[in-house]
Image (cartoon, rainbow, N blue to C red):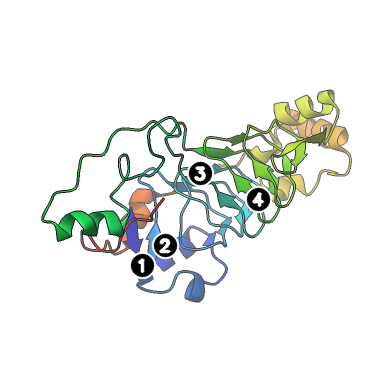
Amino acid sequence: MKILVSEALRALAMQHRIFTADPGSMWPLGSSVMIGLDATIEPYSHLLGGPLIPKACGAFSYTHSSFDIDTSIGRYCSIAFGVRIMGSAHPSGWASLHPFSNNPYPLAGIRTYFTDRGLPLPEAIEFDQGPQEISIGHDVWIGAETLIKRGVTIGEGAVIGARSLVTKDVPPYAIVGGAPARLIRYRFDQPVIEALQACQWWRYGPDVLRDLDVRDPIGFVDRLREREALGDIQPLDLKPLTAKELIEASVVPPAGAGAPTAP
């Protein structure tokens, strides 16, 4: 849904340590922000790409790109400028690819055509576009101007090369690139990958992680396990900011204000 930025919305984001590039220019008062009803944004995250709130964004992640409301981002992710989501699918097995039959409502020309003739808009024919949600795991690095297909899952620790076209799931700790993106190599041998996944280091804050040597992945894991055994560290316990709270702090525009984005 669309909400309008208010002083209360800005204050709420600051209170929950949600950061934008510049609240004065990125979320101007009265500007519109798109948000899904199930959005959850953890404190200490950075939404630097514009007025669209993803389905989830984990602590310490930063994105210079604006994702849609069906995108979930884990913790400690690094996302560059110009990363985009592919548009909706079209029914390639039907007589026509055009959305006049299955999604005419966002197109002003279609709506106006029927209005000019005093006719009601036709019922849209249901069209299964497949999974829409994009899931980005923890500690993922996505290079600039990457294009990602809807429904894709990107595993923990993966690296996506700049200007890649990601049309398939990316395994954890894989480095992929190209159009379409292909596996280049894995960041580590399988035992190291399994150890990193098993320890789930992203459960902890940077105050814990800074005392570990990230240059030595296995040593990093071993030291983390030692500290867990000693009981002197605790996983993060962060209360995410919810869509309900954001909506309540915003201004909801009148019904019918603005037009949906065309496919």
User: Which of the two discs, 3 and 4, labels the residue nearer the N terminus?
Assistant: 3
| Labels 1, 4: front one | 4
Residue of label 1 = 8
Q: How many marks?
A: 4
For residue 236, what is the image quadrant?
top right
Give the farthest residue toward the left: 118
The numbered disc on residue 146 is: 4
Residue under the image location 33 percent in, 50 percent down: 244
Label 2: which secondary element: helix
The numbered disc on residue 12 is: 2
- The residues bearing labels 1 and 3 have C-alpha atoms spaced at a distance of 25 Å
Could you classify mark 3 by the number of other residues whose Cα lies within 10 Å: few (under 14), some (14-19), or many (20 or more)? many
Label 3: which secondary element: strand
Instruction: Residue type at mark 3: give it.
Output: Thr
Residue of label 3 = 71
* 186 vs 137, nearest the viewer: 186
Instruction: Residue type at mark 4: give it.
Output: Thr
Left-right relation of 46 to 214: left
- The residues bearing labels 1 and 4 have C-alpha atoms spaced at a distance of 34 Å
Q: At which x and y percent is residue 186?
A: 81, 33
User: Which of the two discs, 1 and 3, labels the residue nearer the N terminus?
Assistant: 1
| Labels 3, 4: front one | 4
* 114 vs 54, nearest the viewer: 114
Label 1: which secondary element: helix
Instruction: Residue type at mark 2: give it.
Output: Leu
